[in-house]
Amino acid sequence: SAVISQKPSRDICQRGTSLTIQCQVDSQVTMMFWYRQQPGQSLTLIATANQGSEATYESGFVIDKFPISRPNLTFSTLTVSNMSPEDSSIYLCSVGAQGPGANEQFFGPGTRLTVL
Amino acid sequence: LAKTTQPISMDSYEGQEVNITCSHNNIATNDYITWYQQFPSQGPRFIIQGYKTKVTNEVASLFIPADRKSSTLSLPRVSLSDTAVYYCLVGHNNAGNMLTFGGGTRLMVKP
């Protein structure tokens, strides 16, 4: 397993501003992911954070709105840019288990974002 | 792509066994079945994974019939602290469907 921390745990922001969320893992991992979970809803994958290259975004998510950094194998950031109230959500990072046949993910505690 | 279907919600009482079934008719040969549990204000937590037949760990059992088109998560003797949302995912290699969360099943355990 992996221990994952996120900062901040929550924030309240004004529309039009940007927030950068940090995700730190206690071990080197190949695969890191960013999800969004809107109130009362399931999780939606935003992108896969690739170390040393640009993130891979899912349909409906673009780099200009959600720029992602992955400078090394233990750290990633997600920025929510030019925020609107519709961006109010919980943002979660996860890492994929390592090793052959590994299919599970380990999730951070999430960052609860409220945009006014 | 393998899509999963689960009941939206279930109610149970403390001490009962709870069985949550997930349908995945289009499961591929190399897909695994993985279940996660999510408590309010927390990220999902991996609880069990299987490929076929039965898998058991300290938390739950997973029953998978021979055709693998469905699976059943069994929680023995639930307590109030098992109240959570349970998600079934089907896929492999931490890609594609393995990263796609469906609606989940909201389990409410009552005293």
Image: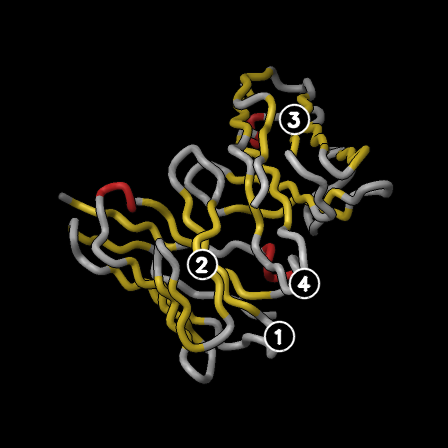
Give, as a three-letter code, the residue at label 1.
Asn
Determine whether the residue tagged by mark 4 lies in a helix, strand or loop: loop
Q: Nearer the viewer, residue B3 or B71?
A: B71
Marks 1 and 3: same chain? no
The crowding category of the residue bearing disc 2, from other C-alpha atoms within 10 Å (few below 14, some 14 to 19, many at least 20), is many
Judge depth for marks 1 and 4 and give the one in front.
Answer: 4
Element type at marker 1? loop
Which of discs 4 and 2 lies nearer the camera? The answer is: 4
Any part of residue B66 in sight: yes
Q: Position of residue A56 (x, y in %)?
A: 77, 48
What's the residue at 70%, 24% (across, down)?
A82
Residue to which mark 3 is pinned: A21
> Which residue has dot 1 on it?
B30
Query: What element does badge 3 sit on?
Result: strand
Give above or below for A86 relative to B48.
Answer: above
Q: Which residue is mark 4?
A: A100
Q: Position of residue A89 (x, y in %)?
A: 53, 32
Q: Residue at x 29, y 45 (%)?
A: B83
* Marks 4,2: beta carbons within 8 A: no
Asked if both marks, 1 and 4, belong to the same chain, the answer given is no
